[in-house]
Image (cartoon, rainbow, N blue to C red):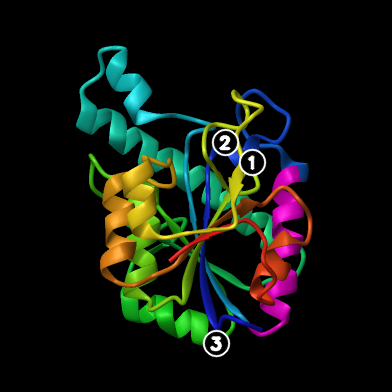
Amino acid sequence: MKYDRILLKLSGESLMGERQYGIDNNRVLQYAHDIKSVVDAGIQVAIVVGGGNIFRGLSAEKSGMERAQADYMGMLATVINCMALQSALEGIGVDTRLQSAIKMEQICEPYIRRRAMAHLESGKVVIFGAGTGNPYFTTDTAASLRAIEIKADVVLKGTRVDGIYTADPEKDPSATRYDEVTFQEVYAKGLNVMDMTAFTLCQENNLPIIVFDMNREGNFMKIAQGEPVGTIVK
């Protein structure tokens, strides 16, 4: 295995599967099986999940809602997704812990860095909910921050596309994919990888990012084994 500890970032939209909103249980179960195979291989896995399939703070702000309030609502949406993923993982025998940046004692632990690392070292999957716990920060930033805090080897961003392209491949059929790109090239070419705060955190801490298609079964394991899947930023 190439990595010892991985931070996997899943967008809320990825949990929709073929649906227009909400959670596709079949998609979540596929993710759970992929995660289980990596955990069974001895790799420590932490996960950050977005909430865009349920509520998007930025969209609500454009409709007139106060930004901080909208962002807190988005954080609560991420916890719903985290609970769905936790349920799927535990249903196939993967021991998990859900930690939230916003206290919700009845359903999850508060985020405590040392406790999260102890869970990982004991073989449990740790799912981080509620973003950073602060408005004006995305779940991409939460993923970068948590990855740095727990000393992950890499951030894997699971999306619906198979890497970073010169343009949006869903809109521009002539777009070409990068196999590897540097942090400086992403800035220079204006490529869309993560929001700038999240991206800069990774760059400053020498934390590589791999963008890949999580919907293709087995891709997660291939990356864990060091195969060239998706696009790596380093």
> Residue 13 shows which numbered tag?
2
Residue 214 locus on image (x, y percent): 67, 52
Asked if residue 112 lies in the magenta stretch, the reply is no
Q: Are the residues tagged 3 and 1 within 8 Å (C-beta)?
A: no
- Of the two numbered discs 1 and 2 in the rendering, the one whose residue sits closer to the viewer: 1
Mark 1 near mark 2, Cβ–Cβ under 8 Å? yes
Horizontal arrangement in the rendering, residue 45 relative to residue 140 (left or right): right
User: Is 97 in front, or is 105?
Assistant: 97
Front-most of residues 6 and 190: 190
Q: Quadrant of residue 171?
A: top right
Magenta residues, start to end: 27-42
Q: Disc 1 or 2, which lies upstream in sequence? A: 2
Residue for badge 1: 160
| Sequence-wise first label, 2 or 3 | 2
* Distance Cα–Cα, label 3 vs label 1: 31 Å
- The residue pinned by badge 3 equals 122
